[in-house]
Image: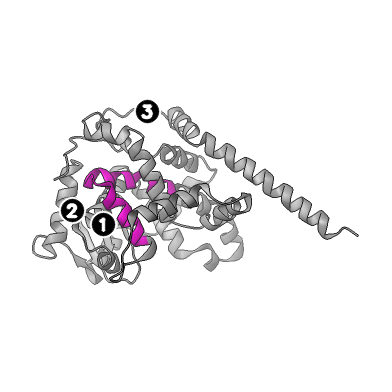
Amino acid sequence: MPTPLPQISSRAWEHPADRAALNTLRAIPGFDEVVRRVAGFITERGVRQLFLANAVKVGPQQRPKLDSLLTDVCTTLDWPDRPELYVTQSPKVNAYAIGFEHPFIVVNSEALELLPDDDERRFLLAHELGHIMSGHMTYRTIALILLAIGTGTLPFPLGVALLPFQLALLEWHRKSELSTDRAGLLAVQEPLVAHRTFMRMAGGPDYGDTASVEEFMRQAAAYETGGDSWDKILKLVNTAFREHPFNTVRAGELERWRTGGTYDLILAGTYTRRGDDGQGLKDDYADAANYYSDKANQAMSSVGDAFNRARDAFADAFKG
């Protein structure tokens, strides 16, 4: 069984860019007004009623194995306010936490089909519990609604006005996923399980063939470090409207955190506990800046190279 982590604070696992991105999001002029207006159209009770009406509520007498896995996760992460859990029929591999004051977890049926192993399901549930423990829920719920609506379905002026908010929400949404991947790992305490989960989400079941987590991790490293400056720009474009980071990126980020020393310290009992997590916003920005400084420099250099190549190609096209 995993080592229990009494009173662990979400600060212990949060990605350095998560809180900084969220606070930057809140600082966008008009953002809080958008959130207030969207939140005014929905109620947590109404959302819960939808799942009570057309999903299966998990409990000791209903999918008791899955119910027990959530209990294990709450025990390991020492979270007393156990959320409700629902399974809904859907062909999309996904799970999410939703709600405001009393958020609950929803797992799509296809996710259970894809992840038959109990530890993989623990990882999935712990990831969603991590969002609840990190206080992500108001903004993630708003993000889910805005993404479900889509700016393309709105009148053109309103869609254009909301697009920056959508992009900013998505950027933070992706950072929050990197945080709670760490919560998932802390709950299962088996890196192979986490990486195998990412591999399955990227490529589906092995269908009786051989699937190698080691090869998948090599692929993750190749995606991160390979390619020229044009490839790096394509990565930015391909990512901009995604809810989640690519699975190779998530695997690589999680492995980097695991081998960086913090993970081992947490398992040894050295971690921030709830009530003792008073780091300020300036520290959030500093941590994020330190983490991303090298990557940012590399990205800017790559973008500069790409524009130089574009300029040269344009000039060559009109020679003679």
Tell whether 146 sits left or right of 163.
left
Residue found 35% across the figure and 56% down from its top: 198
Question: What's the residue at 30%, 71% (across, down)?
Answer: 207
Q: Position of residue 51 (x, y in %)?
A: 26, 66
Q: Which residue occupies the foreground of this view, 83 or 7?
A: 7
Between tags 2 and 3, which lies in front? 2
Magenta segment includes 175: yes
Cα gap from disc 2 to disc 3, whole angstroms: 30 Å
Q: Pinpoint residue 6: horizontal percent, then vertical percent.
A: 17, 35
| Amino acid of disc 2 | Leu
Query: For mark 1, what is the residue?
Result: 105
- Name the side, left or right, on which 99 lies relative to 122: right
Please identify the quarter of the rendering in which residue 12 is found.
top left
Tag 2's secondary structure? helix
Mark 1 or mark 2, whichever is nearer to me: 2
Vertical relation: 270 (above or below) 107: above
Magenta region: which residues? Answer: 174-201
Around disc 3, counting alpha carbons within 10 Å, would you say few (fewer than 14), some (14 to 19), or many (20 or more)?
A: few
Tell me which amino acid carries mark 1: Ile
The reply to whether discs 1 and 2 touch (Cβ–Cβ < 8 Å) is yes
**Dot placed on the residue nearer the N-terminal end, 2 or 3:** 2
Would you place residue 166 above or below residue 11 in this image? Answer: below
Please report whichever mark, 1 or 2, sits nearer to the chain's N-terminal start: 2
Indicate which disc residue 70 carries: 2
Secondary structure of the residue carrying tag 1 is: strand
Mark-to-mark CA distance, 3 and 1:
28 Å
The C terminus: image quadrant: bottom right
- Residue that carries the numbered disc 3 in the rendered image: 279
Side (left or right) of 135 relative to 317: left
